[in-house]
Image: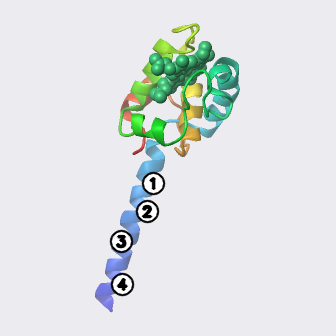
Amino acid sequence: MRVRTICAGLTLSVVLGTSAALADASPFSKEQAEDGHTKFNNHCAQCHRPNMQGAQGPALVGDGFKEKWAGKPVAELRNYIQQNMPQNAPGSLPDDQIDPITAWILSKNGVQPGDKPLSKDAASAAQFPK
Ligand code: HEC
């Protein structure tokens, strides 16, 4: 009985510890993603649709998109966007547009927000979830 209680306690602390670590590791904040919503609609939605289901450009949500980016550093996605998008004006958007827009895309793909906003550095450390 005693052993069982200790085991349950250990399991609980491991589980809690893990979820706290994941929350800390979230590469963007909620406010930033909300800011990115408007910026996405201004710069990206004409080709990817406001719901990101795709039109002239491919879908930025869903299984195909997730499989492509899963396990890769968020920086890779961020850099791709900064260098190639908007497709009709590549490289035109500065960091203060790219970071919130990338945060909004992550949130639409089910990534939970954390305390710190996305930045170039944070994007290198974070991974697109599998
Ligand atoms: C003028 C239309 C257009 C606009 C505006 C545009 N895109 Fe795209 N986007 C495309 C097309 C077309 C592709 C496919 C390019 C290719 O496959 O080479 C693409 C591809 C992408 C991809 C890669 C998709 C994948 O499957 O990995 C991402 C991410 C992306 N766009 C994000 C954005 C973001 C963010 C913006 C706004 C800053 C944006 N796009 C604006 C047309 C557009």
Residue at which label 2 appears: 16
The one of 122 and 109 positioned closer to us in this rendering: 109
Image coordinates for residue 117, horizontal then vertical, percent = 54, 32
Residue at which label 1 appears: 20
Q: Is mark 2 within 8 Å of ligand 1?
A: no
Dot 3 or dot 4: first in sequence order is: 4
Task: Give the alpha-carbon distance from disc 4 to disc 1, as whole Å.
Answer: 23 Å
| Cβ atoms under marks 2 and 1 closer than 8 Å | yes
Image coordinates for residue 86, horizontal then vertical, percent = 57, 14
Rendering quadrant holding ligand 1: top right
At 70% from the left and 26% from the top, the residue drawn is 38
Residue 59 in which image quadrant: top right
Q: Secondary structure at mark 4?
A: helix
Task: Give the alpha-carbon distance from disc 3 to disc 4, as whole Å.
Answer: 10 Å
Classify 10 Å Cα crowding around label 3: few (below 14), some (14-19), many (20 and above): few
Dot 4 or dot 1: first in sequence order is: 4
Q: Is residue 101 above or below residue 128?
A: above
Q: Is residue 8 above or below residue 112?
A: below
Residue 103 in which image quadrant: top right
| Cβ atoms under marks 1 and 3 closer than 8 Å | no
Task: Give the alpha-carbon distance from disc 2 to disc 3, as whole Å.
Answer: 9 Å
Q: Look at label 4 and name its amino acid.
A: Thr
Dot 4 or dot 2: first in sequence order is: 4
Dot 2 or dot 3: first in sequence order is: 3
Image coordinates for residue 96, horizontal then vertical, percent = 58, 18
Which label was assigned to residue 41?
Answer: none
Given the current orientation, which residue lies at the most extreme front position? 56
Residue at which label 3 appears: 11
Image coordinates for residue 2, horizontal then vertical, percent = 32, 89
Given the current orientation, which residue lies at the most extreme left position? 3
Q: Look at label 1 and name its amino acid.
A: Ala
Residue at which label 4 appears: 5
